[in-house]
Amino acid sequence: MTRGEALALQYGDLLYHRTKRQGRGESEPLRVRVTGKVRTWKRDPTRIEIPTKWGLHRHHTITEHQLGEWYTSEAEVEQFRTAHAAVQQEFGLVPDAEEAARREVEVRKVKDLADLLTLALQSGLPDSAERAVAGLDAVGARQTAVEIVDRYNRGLPPFRGAKGRWRKRGEN
């Protein structure tokens, strides 16, 4: 949105964010409603504030620094998104489906090995801990193993347990 478009906004006009999403499955761009007069300053003509509201209770003020992130129509947002996606695909910034699945498997493997290492340390099983460290080293996560062992040695909670709460050293 340009400065001219911002100054032309009226109470009740809708604005759409170019990257933030809302709705079920985040299928729509974030939509806000202008709730007041666009404010400008005589001493600083570049300064602009647009009061907005979204949802039931959320209020936000869009400033001159954020004007480039907002559009006045959904079509402009979709145009931006398709152009942005094309650039990302062209330069290889977006992995294809196979690459994403492979990365997900690697992340899951690292998490499983980290959990195994933590449990081995807590249970006092040095052989299992050594195997877990070797496994983490093999998948390129040596730093993760070092951090887990360091946290264990300092008596800090090393991981989030299966029940979703932090476990302390010696706790079952």
Image: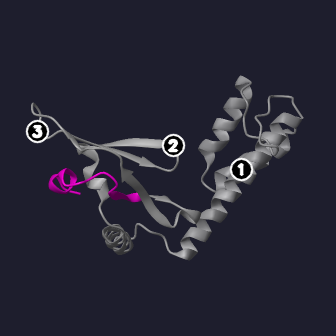
> Which residue is more in the foreground, 160 or 77?
77
* SS for dot 2: loop
* SS for dot 1: helix
- Is residue 130 visible in this depiction of the protein? no
Graded by Cα atoms within 10 Å as few (under 14), some (14 to 19) or many (20 or more), the crowding at tag 1 reads some
Q: Position of residue 28 (x, y in %)?
A: 47, 65
Q: Position of residue 51 (x, y in %)?
A: 33, 43
Which label belongs to residue 21? none
- The residue wearing badge 3 is 45
Magenta region: which residues? Answer: 1-19
**Hey, what amino acid is under mark 2?**
His
Disc 2/disc 1 C-alpha distance (Å): 52 Å
- The residue wearing badge 1 is 134
Q: Position of residue 1 (x, y in %)?
A: 23, 57
- Is residue 134 visible in this depiction of the protein? yes
**Hey, what amino acid is under mark 1?**
Ala
Which label belongs to residue 57? 2
**Hey, what amino acid is under mark 3?**
Pro
Disc 3/disc 1 C-alpha distance (Å): 62 Å
Which quarter of the rendered picture does the C terminus lie within?
Answer: top right
Image point (69%, 58%), residue name:
108
